[in-house]
Image: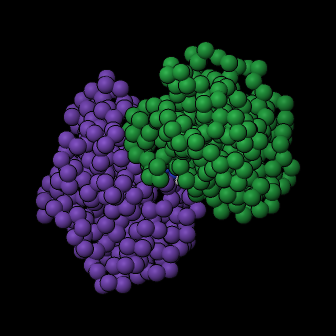
């Protein structure tokens, strides 16, 4: 049993590595975009798409599929990497990111990209969309679950807290919010910009179940999602403590890598580090 | 007028002008919503940290806080991207700021398709329409860095709500340091009688290029920089209609409700003449390089030339 679990964890962490490589390749080619918050979410995304969620890439509109909402839409590269690697569209498309006539827009556009559940990019709005989907699932007796990934800086948007109230008011236990708590936004450290601390406690005070985890520990991500699945009558938030730019040494914890693309030399170095499995 | 060599983004000019203002006017306060490096308020933040208020990613709070500062006698400049200022905080701008006539300056950057690769979610094309429809709101879209800096100073001296629309990219300087910005007045940049191009923002540069192309075909057009879209310079529009008999507007905005709409409203009630509107044709933007997008959406000198040819052909 234990070794089986260990194998699973290794496979998922290998998948996360591939996703990180894709992110770097895409951004190197596009010359613009957001590496930091894409890399910090890679392990979470690998677990969601390769372990947790019931999705069928050959039927992106399957009514019973689980839904994923990238509320922090600027991390589009990590979502596109997942969708391509899952088979929603060819992996080669990734290299058209942000180019004129590409279906891969700078921020997720559901009308253009198969597998994108909602158009995002204006921060703070994803949890409301997820609530709507979770409410619809309850109304229709649907079995599907809804997952929303939020940035920690994004929590500064008032609309997030309006949605946080709605989720618990309607007992949306089929909804999971994941906060990519990488401690950075654009103008600096989230604690300095707007005192973003005690995230779990804040959610709890709004009636949520809240779990703090290491967002790069695959085992912890799986356990937290299991706990959410087993929770009845309340929504769950997973506060995933992460490192912005995770996996690429020169990007880690560097605020400057929020929204700038690597040069060809930096792409090479980043890919070498990722291939070497340096974490 | 400059030889069109130097380039500068209006947002850069804004950032520098703020620092200058801060030195002479202690009432100036600046607010930002986690985009200070992009909106260029970062210079003011470094120089006058006590008078810089970072609200985080919270545009509605940004405008509301600016309103409170204005009520307490400060002159707040609130900055974020145009899409989040005019869009996300529309109700705060309408009901808290404008309804009360508060002295809040909304300095929005990254307007239009020249935002580029970030795509349609970030390319604001409706802000002039939204802001123009609010009673008492002044709407200014500077054509270059010089005009942007001058407008910032003028706006600080004026009492009342203002929406200042700026862009991301560096564009040629049209004016020189001697340029005097007059709020509410169009600036004649090029004179002619075949037709008039009325433009704002980066489209003034495109209009000047178009005028050059037309000149090579023996067509001499007038070019008006209509930086103040509201209150609009009715006099200059009527005069252009009377003297040139045809008008083309050019804006990096939806053709609905922006500069073209404002000019058309004046013309139909005063001196109707053939008119064409160059702008984004009621669609959202998309990802791409700014130059590619200008072409894709028909915001080029060539598109203006075609529109001029059309209005001239329609002249009686
Ligand atoms: C409503 C809105 N305001 C501002 C922005 C510009 N913006 C894009 S990313 C970002 C910072 C996000 O920080 P965080 O949520 O911590 O994301 P991460 O660190 O995961 O990249 C900002 C301010 C936006 N996209 N939407
Ligand atoms: Mg963050």
Side of A158 where B148 appears, left or right:
right
Q: For residue B232, say whether it is visible.
A: yes
Side of B206 where B149 appears, left or right:
right
Number of marks drawn:
0
The answer to whether residue B266 is above or below residue A129 is above
State the residue in front, B18 or B170. B170
State the residue in front, A100 or A7. A100
Q: Quadrant of the C terminus of chain B?
A: top right
- Residue B9 picture location, percent across and down: 59, 29
Determine the colour of chain A.
purple
- Residue B45 picture location, percent across and down: 69, 36
Q: For residue B61, say whether it is visible.
A: no
Residue drawn at x 23%, y 43% as measured from the top left = A93
Residue drawn at x 57%, y 40% as measured from the top left = B315
Farthest residue, direction right: B73
Residue drawn at x 44%, y 47% as measured from the top left = B285
Q: Quadrant of the N terminus of chain B?
A: top right
The answer to whether residue A200 is above or below residue B25 is below
* Quarter where residue B94 is shown: bottom right
Determine the colour of chain B.
green
Residue drawn at x 21%, y 34% as measured from the top left = A275
- Residue A229 picture location, percent across and down: 31, 73
């Amino acid at each position: 049993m234990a070794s089986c679990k260990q194998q699973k964890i290794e496979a998922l962490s290998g998948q996360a590595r591939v996703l990180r490589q894709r992110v770097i390749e895409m951004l190197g080619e596009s010359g613009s975009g957001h590496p930091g918050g894409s890399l910090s979410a890679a392990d979470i995304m690998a677990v969601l798409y390769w372990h947790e969620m019931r999705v069928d890439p050959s039927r992106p509109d399957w009514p019973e599929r689980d839904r994923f909402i990238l509320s922090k839409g600027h991390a589009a590269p990590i979502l596109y990497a997942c969708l391509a690697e899952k088979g929603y569209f060819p992996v080669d498309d990734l290299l058209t990111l942000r180019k004129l006539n590409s279906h891969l827009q700078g921020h997720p556009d559901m009308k253009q990209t198969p597998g994108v559940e909602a158009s995002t990019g204006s921060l703070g709005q994803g949890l409301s969309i997820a609530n709507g989907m979770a409410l619809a699932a309850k109304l229709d007796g649907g079995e599907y679950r809804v997952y929303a990934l939020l940035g920690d800086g994004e929590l500064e948007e008032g609309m997030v807290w309006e949605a946080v109230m709605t989720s618990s008011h309607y007992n949306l236990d089929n909804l999971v919010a994941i906060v990519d708590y990488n401690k950075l936004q654009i103008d600096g450290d989230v604690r300095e910009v707007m005192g973003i601390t005690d995230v779990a406690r804040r959610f709890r005070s709004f009636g949520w179940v809240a779990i703090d985890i290491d967002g790069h520990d695959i085992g912890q991500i799986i356990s937290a999602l299991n706990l959410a699945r087993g929770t009845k009558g309340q929504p769950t938030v997973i506060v995933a403590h992460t490192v912005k730019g995770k996996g690429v040494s020169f990007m880690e914890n560097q605020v400057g890598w929020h929204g700038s693309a690597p040069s060809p030399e930096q792409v090479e170095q980043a890919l070498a580090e990722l291939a070497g499995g340096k974490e | 007028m400059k030889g069109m060599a130097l380039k500068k983004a209006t947002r850069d000019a804004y950032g520098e002008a703020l620092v200058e203002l801060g030195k002479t006017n202690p009432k100036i306060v600046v607010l930002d919503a986690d985009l200070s490096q992009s909106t260029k308020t970062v210079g003011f933040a470094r120089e006058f940290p006590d008078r810089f208020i970072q609200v985080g990613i919270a545009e509605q709070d940004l405008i509301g806080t600016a309103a409170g500062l204005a009520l307490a006698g400060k002159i707040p400049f609130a900055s974020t991207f145009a899409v989040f200022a005019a869009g996300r905080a529309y109700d705060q701008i309408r009901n808290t700021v404008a309804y009360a006539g508060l002295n809040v300056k909304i300095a929005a950057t990254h307007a239009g398709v020249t935002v580029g690769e970030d795509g349609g979610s970030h390319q604001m094309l409706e802000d002039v329409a939204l802001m123009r429809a609010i009673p008492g709101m002044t709407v200014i879209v500077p054509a270059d860095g010089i005009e942007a800096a001058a407008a910032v100073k003028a706006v600080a001296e004026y009492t009342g709500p203002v929406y200042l629309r700026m862009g991301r990219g560096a564009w040629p300087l049209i004016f020189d340091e001697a340029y005097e910005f007059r709020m509410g007045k169009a600036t004649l940049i090029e004179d002619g009688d075949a037709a008039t191009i009325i433009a704002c923002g980066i489209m003034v540069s495109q209009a000047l290029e178009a005028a050059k192309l037309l000149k090579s075909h023996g067509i001499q057009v007038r070019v008006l920089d209509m930086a103040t879209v509201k209150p609009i310079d009715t006099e200059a529009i009527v005069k252009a209609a009377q003297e040139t008999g045809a008008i083309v507007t050019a804006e990096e905005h939806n053709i609905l409700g922006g500069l073209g709409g404002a000019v058309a409203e004046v013309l139909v009630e005063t001196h109707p003449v053939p008119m064409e509107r160059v702008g984004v044709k009621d669609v959202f933007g998309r990802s791409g390089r700014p130059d590619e997008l200008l072409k894709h959406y028909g915001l080029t000198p060539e598109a203006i030339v075609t529109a001029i040819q059309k209005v001239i052909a329609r002249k009686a």
